[in-house]
Image: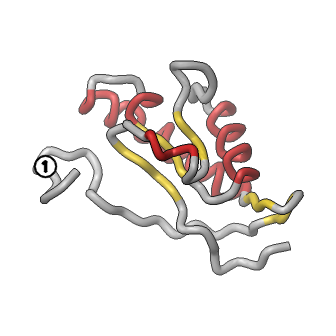
Amino acid sequence: MRGPAPADAPLPALGYLHVEGRAFTNRGSRANPVEARTIAAWLEENRARLEGHYGLPLEQIVGVVTPFGQQVRAIRDACTARGITVSGREGMTIGTVAIMSAFTQQACTGKPGRTCGKVT
């Protein structure tokens, strides 16, 4: 999207939520379970508003991008636990930057890469 956000947009053009958590290294990748659960909770809490505005299922509105493959798995697991479909053609797109190159959803949530917390 270019230009200012529409006045009736359900979300700001760019928003930020700091999430405390701890990133764990596993097989050369990282995961932050607290962050994954927070993303899934936010999606669940905002599902009705987004679906009402866009007239589509949440899974076709939002995509999630993260730089780490292990975090993709953590977010997929957290979303599944909250009833958000993450697999098949109807599933939400959750992936790394490389996978998201063909991204077509209306909204995207993601993380910049590193957090202030320690990596263990």
Q: Horizontal placement of 7 versus 117: left or right? A: left
Q: Is residue 87 above or below residue 100?
A: above
| Number of numbered discs visible in the structure rendering | 1
Q: Amino acid at mark 1?
A: Pro
- The residue at the point 75 percent across, 67 percent down is 23
Residue 114 at x, y percent in the picture: 63, 73
Q: Residue 57: image x %, image y %? A: 40, 24
- The residue carrying mark 1 is 6
The extreme top residue here reads 89
From the image, which quarter does the C terminus lie in?
bottom right
Dot 1 crowding, Cα within 10 Å, few <14, some 14–19, many 20+: few
Residue farthest along the right direction in this orientation: 27
Q: Is residue 58 above or below residue 25?
A: above
Name the residue: 36% across, 44% down: 107
Quadrant of residue 118 within the rendered picture? bottom right
Q: Name which residue lies at 47% across and 46% down.
A: 101
Indicate the colouring scheme: secondary structure
